[in-house]
C-alpha cells in the first residue's frame, strides 16, 4: 500500500529510525503486522483497547493512534529510539487510516455487488440466503454468527431459514412467537436495534420460552456474548423476516455503522425473497439488477478515471433524468447539470448533519437532498429537483451509489490539495530563507510568484479543533473564501496545521489599503458565520520580492503578539509599535511587572487612592509639574507632596534615569494590557 511506503520512508528519513514496526487493528479485531523494518518479527501483538497513546515495554515502545469505530494504528520502535516529527508523522498515519477506510468501503461495495450477482445466478433459495449471510459477516468482521428468521403465517411464528458462523442443526427446531425475545420484538415493532451489553441482551430475551431456550443452548454457546444487531426485512411493505448477528469476545464491537450496513444487506434478502415469491417477475427483477450493476460500474469507472465532479454530475443526470447539483463543502464549489442551473439553498446545520435522504421545499422547488459524509464529517451535498413520488427505487439507488463516488472524488481532491499545501509550505520556507538574488528568483518561479512592484504577507490562525478532519475542512473553506475575497491580489495561499499563509502582490502601493479592508471584512464575516475565532497577523507592504521574507516575519510576529495576548483579532505589524519587544513575553509576566509598580499605590488607606492617577498623569505630561497639576485640578504644592509620597512608596527617585525608565515602561504596559483585554 502506498501510504505504508510513505510511513516507512518518513520513519527512516525524517525520524531516523533504524528499527520499527507498524501494526493495525480494524474495528477492534486482532492486530496484524503490516510493516516491519529490521525488527524482531517474533514480538507479541500490541494490546487491544488501550486508552493511552504510549505503552512502554522492556525492549520496545508502542505509540498508539486511535480512530473511530475501534480502529487503531500502532508504531512500534526499539526502547532506545526517539520519535521525532510526531505531528508530521500523524498526518501520514491519518492518510493511511483514510486509505484503509476507503479500501474497506470498496471491499463492502464489492461484497454487496457479489451478493447482488449471486441473486441472478443461484437458484436454490437456502444456499442463496446462506451466501448473503456469509457476505454480511465478511463486511462486518466483528460479527461471529448470523441467523435469518422467516415468519410462517400457519404457525404464527418465526423459524430459522438460514444461518452461518456456528449454530448446528438444533437451531432449526426453534419457533419464536411474535414479540418473543429479540427476534420476535424486532418483527413485531418492525424496527432494527443494537444491544451492546449483556444486561440489555438478557433483559430483551427474558420472555423466551423454555423450549426455545433449550434448543438455542444446544445449538450454540453464548459464553462470551457481548453485542447483537437485529434488523427486520420487509417484502412489499410487510415484515416477513428478521436478520440477526451476534458478536462474542471480551468487549462489545458492533456499532451503528454495522447496523446500517446490516440494514443494507437486509434489503438484499428482501429482494431474494421477493424473487422467490414472485417468480413470474424474475426477468424484470434481473433487468433491474443488471442495470444496478451497470450504474455501479459506470460510476466506479468515472471515479477511477478522475473525471471530476462536473462529469459525475452530468452522468448522474443522464441516469435519473432530473436536474441536480453537487456542492463541495471543502471549497463551496457547485457543479450543476445542466450547467446553467443555480440554486442558492441554505446549507444550514439541519442539512449538514443529516446523513439520510429527505425532501426540502426551497423557493417553491422540491429538492431531494443527500449529504455526502466521509468519516462522520459532512463534506458535500447532492440536491436533485424532484417530487417525493418521483423518487423511484432505481433513482434512490443511483443517488445512494453516486454519493459514495462523490465522497471519494472530494476526498481525492482534498488529499491532492493537502499534498500541494505541504509541498508549497516546504518551498516557501526555502524561499524565505534565501539571501542570494538569483536563488530568490529561482524559488519564486517554483512557487509561482510573479514579479510585481509590491508584496505583503499575512498569517491566519484557525481556531484549533480536536477533530483533525473537521479542522482540515475548515482550512480548505478558509483558503477558498480568501481567493474569492481577494481575487487578483492573491499571489500564493496555502495551509499547514491550523495556520494559513497568504502572500498578496500589488501593482500600486495604495492597493494594500483595499486588501487590508477586505481582510478585515473577511475576518469578521468568518467569525459571524462559523462562530469560531481567527487570529490574523499582517506584515508590512514592501517593494520587491527580496522583502517578502521580511514581510512574512512581521506577519508571523504580529500573529505571535495576538497569541501571547490571547486575543482573537486582526492586527498589522506596524500598529504593534513598541509591543514587538514583548511579543514572546508571557502575559502573566507583564501583568506581574505592572502590579509590582502600581500595587503599592492602590491602597485606600491614608488617602493614597489618588497616587495611582497622579503617577499616570505625571508621566503622561512628561513629568511637567505645572501642566500635571492643572490636569489634576490641584495646587502644584499638593502635586509635589504626592510625588514625594510616590517616591517613598515605590522606593524610587524621579531624578534617577533608570527609575524613570522603569515607571514609563510600567505605565505604558498598564495602558497597553488594559486596552487589549
Image: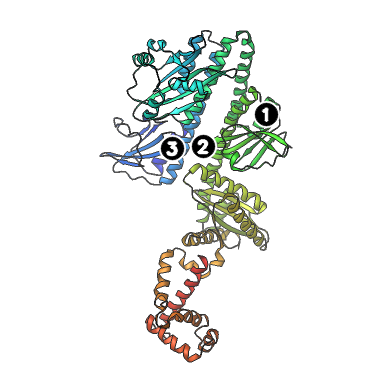
Residue at point 40%, 75% (across, down):
599
Left or right, residue 153 beside residue 655: right
From the image, state whether disc 1 or disc 2 is nearer to you. 1
From the image, state whether disc 3 or disc 2 is nearer to you. 2
The earlier-in-sequence mark between 1 and 2 is 2
Q: In this view of the protein, which residue sits in the foreground, 103 or 332?
A: 332
Left or right, residue 343 beside residue 605: right
Percent position of residue 417, x then y: 56, 42
The earlier-in-sequence mark between 3 and 2 is 3
- Alpha-carbon neighbours of circle 2 within 10 Å: few (<14), some, or many (≥20)? few
From the image, state whether disc 1 or disc 3 is nearer to you. 1
Q: Which mark is residue 67?
A: 3
- Alpha-carbon neighbours of circle 1 within 10 Å: few (<14), some, or many (≥20)? few
Left or right, residue 314 beside residue 252: right
Percent position of residue 632, x then y: 53, 84
How far, Cα to Cα, is label 1 from label 2? 27 Å
Q: 523 above or below 413?
A: below
Q: In this view of the protein, which residue sits in the foreground, 254 or 420?
A: 254
**Residue receiving disc 2:** 376
Percent position of residue 394, x then y: 64, 22
Amino acid at each position: 500500500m502506498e501510504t505504508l511506503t510513505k510511513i516507512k520512508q518518513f520513519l527512516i528519513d525524517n525520524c531516523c529510525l533504524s528499527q520499527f514496526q507498524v501494526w493495525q487493528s480494524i474495528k477492534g479485531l486482532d492486530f496484524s503486522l503490516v510493516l516491519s523494518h529490521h525488527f524482531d518479527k517474533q514480538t507479541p501483538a500490541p494490546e487491544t483497547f488501550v486508552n493511552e497513546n504510549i505503552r512502554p515495554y522492556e525492549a520496545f515502545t508502542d505509540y498508539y493512534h486511535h480512530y473511530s469505530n475501534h480502529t487503531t494504528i500502532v508504531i512500534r520502535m526499539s526502547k532506545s529510539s526517539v520519535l521525532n516529527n510526531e505531528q508530521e508523522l500523524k498526518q501520514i498515519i491519518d492518510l493511511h487510516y483514510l486509505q484503509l477506510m476507503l479500501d474497506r468501503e470498496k471491499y463492502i461495495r464489492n461484497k454487496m455487488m457479489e451478493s447482488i450477482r449471486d441473486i441472478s445466478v443461484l437458484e436454490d433459495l437456502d444456499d442463496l440466503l446462506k451466501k448473503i449471510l456469509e457476505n454480511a459477516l465478511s463486511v462486518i468482521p466483528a460479527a461471529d454468527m448470523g441467523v435469518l428468521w422467516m415468519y410462517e403465517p400457519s404457525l404464527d411464528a418465526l423459524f430459522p431459514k438460514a444461518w452461518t458462523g456456528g449454530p448446528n442443526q438444533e437451531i432449526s427446531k426453534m419457533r419464536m412467537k411474535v414479540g418473543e425475545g429479540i427476534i420476535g420484538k424486532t418483527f413485531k415493532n418492525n424496527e432494527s436495534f443494537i444491544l451492546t451489553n449483556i444486561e440489555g441482551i438478557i433483559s430483551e430475551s427474558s420472555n423466551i420460552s423454555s423450549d426455545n431456550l433449550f434448543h438455542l443452548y444446544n445449538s450454540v454457546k453464548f459464553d462470551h456474548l457481548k453485542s447483537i444487531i437485529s434488523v427486520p426485512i420487509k417484502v412489499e411493505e410487510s415484515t416477513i423476516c428478521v436478520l440477526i448477528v451476534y458478536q462474542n469476545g471480551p468487549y462489545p464491537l458492533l456499532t451503528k455503522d454495522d447496523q446500517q450496513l446490516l440494514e443494507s444487506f437486509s434489503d438484499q434478502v428482501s429482494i431474494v425473497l421477493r424473487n422467490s415469491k414472485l417468480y413470474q417477475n424474475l426477468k424484470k427483477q434481473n433487468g433491474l439488477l443488471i442495470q444496478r450493476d451497470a450504474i455501479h460500474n459506470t460510476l466506479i469507472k468515472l471515479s477511477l478515471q478522475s473525471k471530476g465532479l462536473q462529469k459525475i454530475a452530468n452522468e448522474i443526470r443522464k441516469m435519473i433524468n432530473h436536474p441536480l447539483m453537487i456542492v463541495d463543502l471543502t471549497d463551496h464549489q457547485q457543479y450543476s447539470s445542466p450547467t446553467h442551473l443555480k440554486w442558492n439553498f441554505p446549507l444550514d446545520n439541519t442539512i449538514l448533519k443529516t446523513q439520510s435522504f429527505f425532501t426540502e421545499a426551497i423557493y417553491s422547488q422540491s429538492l431531494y437532498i443527500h449529504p455526502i459524509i466521509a468519516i462522520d464529517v459532512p463534506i458535500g451535498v447532492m440536491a436533485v429537483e424532484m417530487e417525493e413520488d418521483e423518487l423511484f427505487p432505481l433513482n434512490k439507488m443511483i443517488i445512494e451509489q453516486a454519493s459514495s463516488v462523490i465522497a471519494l472524488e472530494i476526498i481525492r481532491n482534498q488529499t491532492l490539495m493537502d499534498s500541494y499545501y505541504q509541498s508549497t509550505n516546504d518551498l516557501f520556507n526555502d524561499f524565505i530563507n534565501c539571501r542570494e538574488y538569483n536563488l530568490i528568483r529561482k524559488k519564486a518561479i517554483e512557487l509561482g510568484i510573479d514579479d510585481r512592484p509590491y508584496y505583503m504577507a499575512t498569517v491566519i490562525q484557525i481556531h484549533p479543533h480536536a477533530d483533525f478532519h473537521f479542522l482540515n475542512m475548515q482550512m480548505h473553506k478558509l483558503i477558498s473564501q480568501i481567493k474569492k475575497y481577494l481575487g487578483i491580489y492573491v499571489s500564493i495561499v496555502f495551509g499547514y496545521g491550523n495556520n494559513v499563509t497568504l502572500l498578496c502582490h500589488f501593482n500600486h502601493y495604495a492597493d494594500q489599503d483595499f486588501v487590508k479592508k477586505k481582510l478585515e471584512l473577511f475576518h469578521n464575516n468568518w467569525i459571524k458565520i462559523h462562530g469560531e475565532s481567527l487570529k490574523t497577523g499582517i506584515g508590512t507592504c514592501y517593494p520587491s520580492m527580496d522583502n517578502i521574507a521580511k514581510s512574512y516575519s512581521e506577519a508571523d510576529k504580529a500573529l505571535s503578539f495576538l497569541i501571547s495576548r490571547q486575543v482573537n483579532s486582526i492586527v498589522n505589524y506596524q500598529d504593534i509599535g513598541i509591543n514587538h519587544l514583548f511579543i514572546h513575553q508571557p502575559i502573566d509576566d507583564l501583568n506581574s511587572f505592572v502590579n509590582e509598580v502600581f500595587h503599592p499605590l492602590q491602597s485606600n488607606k491614608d488617602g493614597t487612592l489618588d497616587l495611582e492617577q497622579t503617577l499616570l498623569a505625571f508621566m503622561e505630561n512628561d513629568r511637567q509639574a505645572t501642566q500635571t497639576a492643572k490636569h489634576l485640578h490641584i495646587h502644584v504644592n499638593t502635586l509635589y507632596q504626592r510625588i514625594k509620597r510616590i517616591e517613598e512608596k515605590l522606593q524610587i527617585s524621579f531624578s534617577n534615569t533608570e527609575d524613570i525608565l522603569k515607571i514609563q515602561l510600567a505605565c505604558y504596559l498598564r495602558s497597553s494590557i488594559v486596552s487589549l483585554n
